[in-house]
Image (cartoon, rainbow, N blue to C red):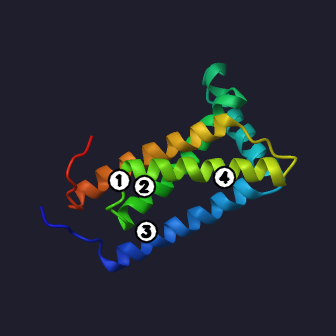
Amino acid sequence: MPRRRLHPSARALVAGLLTAWLGVLAVALLAPSPAGPAWLVETVSRIGTEQGLPASLTALSRVEFVLNVVAFAPVPFLGAMLWDRLTWRDWTAGGFVASFLVEVVQAVAFPERSATHADIVANTLGALLGAFAGAVVVRLLGGSERPRTS
């Protein structure tokens, strides 16, 4: 199947969205105060509780985990549309490395932030899910055909 590239205006839109999301992530992940992320977790938990979700789903630790997954998924999803030769493995490894580095910075430079292994797991899972979704979209758009490797 021949490769079809995104139209230049669509590529510019995707690149703009990716850049904007990376900016949002940088602010949220590298802010010295945990106030913003804590507020978001508490708000989502409260809304879930108000909507009748069970307490097991609205527990702060569970909501934080899910939000960490959701935070990292757009990067490989959008990135796959720009660089369709990168595989889900590349994006997942990149998500792991980026998450690990963020947690190291939080642990070393921001004593008020809590660096946890659970955040690395959640962020890496988000990268994996985003990479799979991006691969599906690239395939549907007629992206590159790569030989299957095990």
- Which residue type carries mark 4? Leu
- Which residue type carries mark 2? Phe
Q: Of tags 4 and 3, which is closer to the observer?
A: 4
Q: Residues within 10 Å of mark 4 (few under 14, many from 20)?
A: few
> For the residues marked 1 and 3, what is the alpha-carbon distance in whole angstroms?
18 Å
Mark 3 vs 2: CB contact within 8 A: no
Mark 1 vs 3: CB contact within 8 A: no
Q: Which residue is mark 2?
A: 77
Specify the label residue 14 is tagged with.
3
Identity of the residue drawn at 37% across and 65% down: 83
Image position, residue 112 (x, y; %) = 87, 46
Image position, residue 86 (x, y; %) = 36, 58
Label whose residue precedes the other's in the sequence (4 or 2) = 2
> For the residues marked 1 and 4, what is the alpha-carbon distance in whole angstroms?
21 Å
Q: Dividing the image into 4 quarters, which one contains the N terminus? A: bottom left
Label whose residue precedes the other's in the sequence (2 or 1) = 2
Kindly state the secondary structure of the residue where label 2 is placed.
helix
Kindly state the secondary structure of the residue where label 1 is placed.
loop
Image position, residue 10 (x, y; %) = 36, 73
Q: Of tags 2 and 1, which is closer to the observer?
A: 1
> For the residues marked 2 and 1, what is the alpha-carbon distance in whole angstroms?
11 Å
Mark 4 vs 2: CB contact within 8 A: no
Residue 121 visible in the picture: yes
The answer to whether 100 appears left or right of 32 in the picture is left
Specify the label residue 87 is tagged with.
1
Identity of the residue drawn at 42% across and 53% down: 90
Kindly state the secondary structure of the residue where label 3 is placed.
helix
Label whose residue precedes the other's in the sequence (1 or 4) = 1
Mark 1 vs 4: CB contact within 8 A: no
Label whose residue precedes the other's in the sequence (3 or 2) = 3
Q: Residues within 10 Å of mark 2 (few under 14, many from 20)?
A: many
Q: Which residue is mark 4?
A: 101
